[in-house]
Amino acid sequence: MADEILVKGLTPGKTYVLEQVGGQWTKREVQVVGGGPTAPNPPPQGSELSKRITDWTKAISPATAPETVKALILTTRAIRTQVERGKTQPLDVWGGDKVFSTAYDVIIGAQDETDRWKTWRKNHTDEVIRQTQDPANGLKTKAQVMQLLADTEAGLQGYLDTSGLLDKIDFRKVIRIVSLLIRMKNFDITVIFEILEILKGEAAAVGQALTG
């Protein structure tokens, strides 16, 4: 029932707040001023860092679930979109509010894969530190932060593209995982709805029914 509410709540021209009460999802319509949101753009592909991130993901043992990777891809895209739109300050992605690490804790923890991802996350943290300490970079500007997020997303996508698992993704499970971000204070609900719309479209493209 939770999946049905999540999908049907994404009605064109309408926006809903999703709430979980007693284990059940409920929705209430809210008014949105202005035009409808546009879907976040996919990241550029093929940087050296993104290839390393793909390799880090391949090295996870036991292998991570494809649903975990898909949820992290969309979570990273949501953070990048919020930085682009000024809803998250660049310095709050890895410092300050630590939006990236907090969101990854939620997604990976929901899949009970915290231990599996320890090496990956250490490698990624080391890269964040390296760039932060680089006088030519510093991860201080919107463009610099968005580039690292784009490289991260592309690297995770590179893993899925070469894993042979794309057709094994359970989109219902991904929706359940990503919907956990709704409760996080650092995420704008409009951005999460956009991500859910992306999932809805991808599921339809591979013939997965998300209702019933």
Image (cartoon, rainbow, N blue to C red):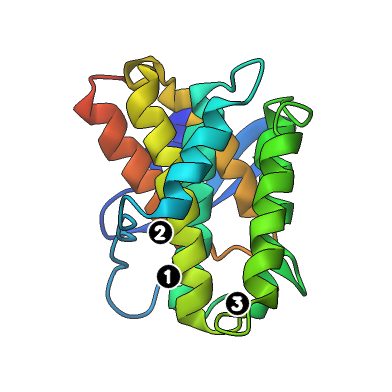
Place of residue 144 in the rendered image (x, y in percent of width and height, measured from the top left): 50, 76
What's the residue at 66%, 19% (across, down)?
61
Pointer 2 and pointer 1: residues touching (CB < 8 Å)?
A: yes
Tell me the quarter of the image containing the C terminus.
top left
Pointer 3 and pointer 1: residues touching (CB < 8 Å)?
A: no
Vertical arrangement, residue 34 with respect to residue 44, above or below? below
Place of residue 167 in the rendered image (x, y in percent of width and height, measured from the top left): 32, 17
Place of residue 181 in the rendered image (x, y in percent of width and height, measured from the top left): 62, 50
Using a 10 Å C-alpha cutoff, classify the residue at mark 2 as few (fewer than 14 neighbours), some (14 to 19) or many (20 or more).
Answer: some
Sequence-wise, the earlier of marks 2 and 1 is 2
The residue identified by callout 1 is 31
Q: Secondary structure at mark 3?
A: loop
The residue identified by callout 2 is 15
Q: Is residue 112 left or right of residue 187?
A: right
What's the residue at 77%, 75% (across, down)?
96
Q: Is residue 4 left or right of residue 123?
A: left
Sequence-wise, the earlier of marks 3 and 1 is 1
> Splitting the image into 4 quarters, where does residue 171 fall?
top left
Vertical arrangement, residue 80 with respect to residue 126, above or below? below
Of residue 32 and residue 50, the one placed in the foreground of this image is 50
The residue identified by callout 3 is 139
Q: Secondary structure at mark 1?
A: loop
Place of residue 71 in the rendered image (x, y in percent of width and height, measured from the top left): 52, 38
* Gap in angstroms between the C-alphas marked 2 and 1: 7 Å
Q: Amino acid at mark 1?
A: Gln
**Which mark, residue 69?**
none
